Image: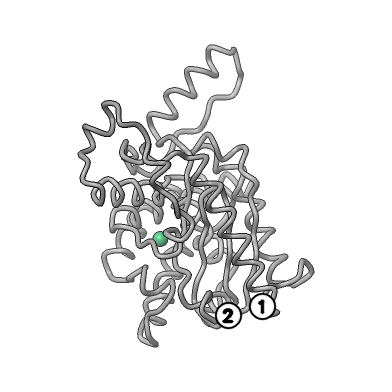
Amino acid sequence: MSIFTTASLLDSCGCCTGRIWHARRAFLLAAAGAAALPVAAQVDVGKSSAMRQLVPVEQLETSATQQYDQMLAQAKAKRALAPDNHPQLIQLRAIAQRIIPYAQQWNSRAGSWRWEVNLIGSKQINAFCMPGGKIAFYTGILDQLKLTDDEIAMVMGHEMAHALREHARERIAKSQATSIGLSLGAQLLGLGELGNMAANLGTQLLTLKFSRSDESEADLVGLELAARAGYDPQAAVSLWQKMGQATGNGGIGFLSTHPTGPDRIRELEQNVPRVQGLYLQSRR
Ligand SMILES: [Zn+2]
């Protein structure tokens, strides 16, 4: 069961950030004479760290895919990989299908990601999305928290947001730059990418813990993604209330990397009105 107990939150990669990206995209579309302009993001998450660019995104995505495939193979060997006709897997994939069209707005690379969604039989409360759009849910998070479709969409949106905002890439860049004693300035001024030193990115992906601000970003971007896809934003609040109750039963997996407290829930509550219009619009 080692794989199930060590896997934590993996995330992903891509490129841009909300407002800057929107501006560039709006410009490109206008220049191309396109009729439709992108809808501006409703949540405010600021810019992504430039530091992430030290890790080559293609290499990170390739490593993530290898790690994901290996994890699926191990799960399959233990007869813990849900088959395509498993009802909960069908449910997860249907939710992903509704959210994915809105992903590219947050990361231009996401349009060419080969998204995958799989379900692993494990009591652990866990879910993740690796760089490049490789998603996994554990049966524990669905069953123990008795998640509704709306709440599943909030978890999925949150995890996809880590990937879209390239939080793993940023964490790895920061830890590697520190470990080899190079300043960011030196790196940016000509020492190039950390790629070749990142010999084992995939392994690192399994032990990453994101920062508080990464978590806050993932909450808000995920909330917006799910709302655009037609999922009730209020479910973000009920989801984290359920997480908070489950934390009392021992925080491993998702719960250990996602502390729930009044601050987290309050921030989500404050942002629900911002995306309510998107939700209502998508329900029409
Ligand atoms: Zn998270």
Tally the numbered discs: 2
Q: Is residue 276 visible?
A: no
**Three-letter residue code for mark 1:** Ala
Asked if the residues shown at circle 1 and circle 2 are in contact, with their CB atoms under 8 angstroms apart, the answer is yes
Residue occupied by mark 1:
80
Q: Nearer the viewer, residue 23 or 187?
A: 187
Residue 82 higher or lower than 42, as above or below = below
Q: Secondary structure at mark 1?
A: loop
The answer to whether 189 appears left or right of 105 in the picture is: left
Image quarter for ligand 1: bottom left
Query: What residue sits 54% from the left and 36% below the top?
Result: 109
Query: What residue sits 57% from the left and 68% below the top?
Result: 137
The answer to whether 55 appears left or right of 190 in the picture is: right
Residue occupied by mark 2:
122
Query: What residue sits 69% from the left and 58% below the top?
Result: 94
Residue 115 higher or lower than 136, as above or below = above
**Three-letter residue code for mark 2:** Ser
Q: Position of residue 48 (x, y in %)?
A: 34, 40
Q: Position of residue 85 (x, y in %)?
A: 79, 69
Q: Which residue sits furthest bottom? A: 249
